[in-house]
């Protein structure tokens, strides 16, 4: 069996969409699960919209997700170059081959002329599938002479053989394309640049791609590509078309459903391992239906046989839940390192983050069970920096029950502690509770509300320790005196 080679071929015209990331993941997992090779190719022939910054962003997001590739624009490889803009001569060479063999022909018509033909066919309830006779008939011999004289170049169209074709798709099964499912189509534009369907065939064939894994929105292109493989004498790769990702309302996933790009989730503090884990479950399931899996297990267990034919439903709540699980697995040191972009400078300055590393590490650890994304950290850490507003109802209630004196005693004892440690805090606090008439649960709940203004939060002893004696005494004093 030949080495499995898959590829992911994004266009550098924007961000990496979660749908594209899912496609890249499945292509990566399939290659790795078969000890094969994963290739990155940049499809940048849309010169007006393609940008270097977008390409860099795409590659950075893919690396962040944990993908590695054997060949690509940044690492080179045997079958390069890996940017379509650097492969134009190859496309022109193979277009000329088809022209020489009679499978392709020049079309000297303007784009407007072809659009008028399209509209005319639609108005007659005809499917706009063009034939050579139709397209060549759009321009008179006299006009063609003028074209050539002016230096204008024609487009090149492929003359597709009208016959039934069957695609043995590795996900969807056999798909039948009738003889009338497609007409002649452009392979080179008049500017010499290839169309998508032509470039992708030449590239996949010359790069020895064995398996093409992509979204099922490409199914309409597949019949054209199969015909081109046959005409060029290339071996057709195996195809696997992944079902569309839908939003919770069962419509195509879009901005209205929330974040849709990997970059947006990175900014929100989604961990790459959580993102990969969640994307893997969009249309695929583990043999034992496990939900939490690292990359190694995904590679071991992934197979196209377990990819569903049905659309996957994107549920951001599930992603956030999963991200929370991964956050809680982080060591204190890992959390400290990953939190920096979210803490500096909104919560601490750069110098404070470094100089107070021990305190920051403990503070971050104290709230990690309360967050689903790292961007929530500044808000959760406010319990340590933001003095709560006076709770008059709580004070009045404690006053009526004669309990204010208990918190006065607690303040005085905290103030007298020489060595501010968790052990000394527990000792003093338990002593006050024991000597009071307040139920322990009520005492600790009220103390938390006095110190933070909240009903829940970090472990109370950890909270008191990290607030520091000065802050704790100050907040108790303010509550008692206001």
Image: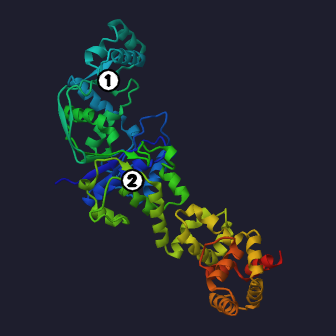
Q: CA distance from mark 1 to mark 2?
A: 33 Å
Q: Earlier in the sequence, mark 1 or mark 2?
A: 2
User: Is label 1 in a helix, a strand or a loop?
Assistant: strand
The location of residue 136, given as percent across then percent down, is 30, 14
Residue located farthest toward the front when viewing the structure as drawn:
400
Of badges 1 and 2, nearer the viewer stands 1
Left or right? Give the position of 57 relative to 388.
left
**On the image, which quarter does residue 122 sit in?**
top left
Q: Residue at x 41, y 38 (%)?
A: 85
Contact between labelled residues 2 and 1, with CB atoms less than 8 Å apart: no
Left or right? Give the position of 363 relative to 232.
right
**On the image, which quarter does residue 151 sit in?**
top left
From the viewer's side, name the closer residue of 394 and 307. 394
Q: Residue at x 76, y 85 (%)?
A: 411
* Label 2 sits on residue: 75
User: 10 Å neighbourhood of mark 2: few (<14), some, or many (≥20)?
Assistant: few
Residue located farthest toward the top when viewing the structure as drawn:
142
The location of residue 402, given as percent across then percent down, is 76, 84
The location of residue 119, given as percent across then percent down, is 38, 17
One can see residue 343 in this view: no
Number of numbered markers: 2
What is the image's colouring?
A: rainbow
Q: Examine the rendered structure and indicate whether residue 227 appears above or below residue 315.
A: above
User: Is label 2 in a helix, a strand or a loop?
Assistant: loop
Q: Examine the rendered structure and indicate whether residue 10 appears above or below residue 108.
A: below
User: 10 Å neighbourhood of mark 1: few (<14), some, or many (≥20)?
Assistant: many
* Label 1 sits on residue: 156
Q: Examine the rendered structure and indicate whether residue 254 appears above or below residue 408.
A: above
The location of residue 319, given as percent across then percent down, is 45, 58
**On the image, which quarter does residue 101 sit in?**
top left
Could you tell me which quadrant the C terminus lies in? bottom right
């Amino acid at each position: 069996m030949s080495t499995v080679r898959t590829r992911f071929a994004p266009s550098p015209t924007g961000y990496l969409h979660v749908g594209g990331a899912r496609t890249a993941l499945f292509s990566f997992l399939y290659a790795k699960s078969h000890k094969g090779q994963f290739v990155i190719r940049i499809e940048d022939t849309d010169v007006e919209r393609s940008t270097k910054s977008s390409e860099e962003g795409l590659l950075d997001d893919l690396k962040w997700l944990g993908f590695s590739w054997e060949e690509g624009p940044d690492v080179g490889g045997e079958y390069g170059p890996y940017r379509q803009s650097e492969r134009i001569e190859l496309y022109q060479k193979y277009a000329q081959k088809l022209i020489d063999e009679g499978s392709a022909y020049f079309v000297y018509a303007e784009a407007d002329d072809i659009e008028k033909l399209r509209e005319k066919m639609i108005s007659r309830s005809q499917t706009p599938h063009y034939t050579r006779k139709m397209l060549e008939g759009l321009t008179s011999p006299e006009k063609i002479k003028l074209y050539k004289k002016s230096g204008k170049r024609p487009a090149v169209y492929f003359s597709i053989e009208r016959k039934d074709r069957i695609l043995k798709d590795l996900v969807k099964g056999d798909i039948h394309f009738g003889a009338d499912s497609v007409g002649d189509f452009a392979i080179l534009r008049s500017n010499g640049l290839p169309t998508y369907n032509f470039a992708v065939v030449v590239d996949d064939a010359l790069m020895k791609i064995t398996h093409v894994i992509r979204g099922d929105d490409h199914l309409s292109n597949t019949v054209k590509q199969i015909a081109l493989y046959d005409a060029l004498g290339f071996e057709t790769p195996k195809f696997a078309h992944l079902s569309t990702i839908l939003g919770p309302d069962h419509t195509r996933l879009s901005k209205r459903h929330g974040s849709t790009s990997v970059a947006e989730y990175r900014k929100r503090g989604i961990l790459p391992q959580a993102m990969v884990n969640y994307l893997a479950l969009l249309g695929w399931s583990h043999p034992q239906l496990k939900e939490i899996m690292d990359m190694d297990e995904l590679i071991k267990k992934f197979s196209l046989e377990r990819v569903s034919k049905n659309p996957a439903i994107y549920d951001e709540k599930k992603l956030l839940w999963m991200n929370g699980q991964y956050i809680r697995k982080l060591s204190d040191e890992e959390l400290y390192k990953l939190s920096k972009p979210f803490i500096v400078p909104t919560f601490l300055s750069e110098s404070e983050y470094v100089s107070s590393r021990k305190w920051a590490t403990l503070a971050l650890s104290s709230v990690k069970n309360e967050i689903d994304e790292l961007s929530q950290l500044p808000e959760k850490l406010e319990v340590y920096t933001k003095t709560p507003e006076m709770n008059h109802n709580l004070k009045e209630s404690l006053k009526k029950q004669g309990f204010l004196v208990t918190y006065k005693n607690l303040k005085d004892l905290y103030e007298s502690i020489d060595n501010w440690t968790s052990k000394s805090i527990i000792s003093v606090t338990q002593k006050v509770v024991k000597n009071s008439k307040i139920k322990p649960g009520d005492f600790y709940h009220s103390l938390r509300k006095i110190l933070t203004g909240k009903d829940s939060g970090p472990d109370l002893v950890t909270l008191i320790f990290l607030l520091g004696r000065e802050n704790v005494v100050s907040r108790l004093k303010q509550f008692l005196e206001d």
